[in-house]
Image (cartoon, rainbow, N blue to C red):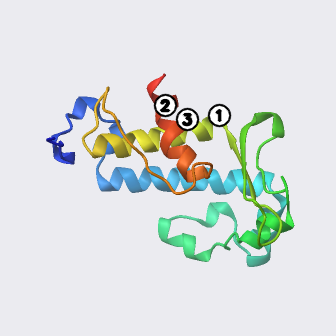
């Protein structure tokens, strides 16, 4: 079977971000990062507390490299604020939940909004197109754990994207 290579994907099939210059892409990434940081700071008490303790505010992030000044989120943070204390949206906006089994402690719960799922679908679709995929291309996504968020994202998200 002949598999197309990434360079053969016509620009008309690509999302504009897939053909953006590196400068444009970095600017877009910085804008999205700053939006996410502001959103977390305004809506998740733990993030506000951690930022304030470090004397860092989302507006202080001027470059992608400034990420080095931000605190990490740890698995312990997720467990200590179990189950929904780290969510930055109201529960009525959460349309899907994934949770670990909790075999090493409390389960880790992650919630997804419709926008999260749509974004995930776009990311998966971009990777398929970058590999030469076209409408109608059949894909297989072998995973060790079918119920994991990663497995779900690689299988369900493309279907959601294709159905739109």
Whether residue 16 sits left or right of residue 84 in the image: it is left
User: Relative to residue 17, is residue 10 drawn left or right?
Assistant: left
Count the numbered circles shown. 3
Instruction: Name the front one of labels 2 and 1.
Output: 2
Disc 2 versus disc 3: nearer the observer: 2
The disc placed on residue 114 is 1
Q: Nearer the viewer, residue 162 or 85?
A: 162
Mark 2 or mark 1, earlier in chain: 1
The location of residue 63, given as percent across then percent down, is: 49, 65
- Which residue has dot 2 on it? 159
The CA span between labels 1 and 3 is 6 Å
Label 2 Cα neighbours within 10 Å, binned few <14 / some 14-19 / many ≥20:
some
Distance, label 2 to label 1, CA atoms, is 14 Å
Q: Quadrant of residue 92?
A: top right
Q: Position of residue 155 (x, y in %)?
A: 50, 40
Residue 118 circle label = 3
Q: Residue at x 31, y 40 (%)?
A: 129
- Which of pointers 2 and 3 lies earlier in the amino acid sequence? 3
Residue 97 image label:
none
Q: Position of residue 55 (x, y in %)?
A: 74, 75
| Residue in the picture at 77% in, 43% down | 89
Q: What residue is rendered at 56% in x and 70% in y?
A: 67
Q: Secondary structure at mark 3?
A: helix
Q: Are marks 1 and 3 in contact (CB under 8 Å)?
A: yes
């Amino acid at each position: 079977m002949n598999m197309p290579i990434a360079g053969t994907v016509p620009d008309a099939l690509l999302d504009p971000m897939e053909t953006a210059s590196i400068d444009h892409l970095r600017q877009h990434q910085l804008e999205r990062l700053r939006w996410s940081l502001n959103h977390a700071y305004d809506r998740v008490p733990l993030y506000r507390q951690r930022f304030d303790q470090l004397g860092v505010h989302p507006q202080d992030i001027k470059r992608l490299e400034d990420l080095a000044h931000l605190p990490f989120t740890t698995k312990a943070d997720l467990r200590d604020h179990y189950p929904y204390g780290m969510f930055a949206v109201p529960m009525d906006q959460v349309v899907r939940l994934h949770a670990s089994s909790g075999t090493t402690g409390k389960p880790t719960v992650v919630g997804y909004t419709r926008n999260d799922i749509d974004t995930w679908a776009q990311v998966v679709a971009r990777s398929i197109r970058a590999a030469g995929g076209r409408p109608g291309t059949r894909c297989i996504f072998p995973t060790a754990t079918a119920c994991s968020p990663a497995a779900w994202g690689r299988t369900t998200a493309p279907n959601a994207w294709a159905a739109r």
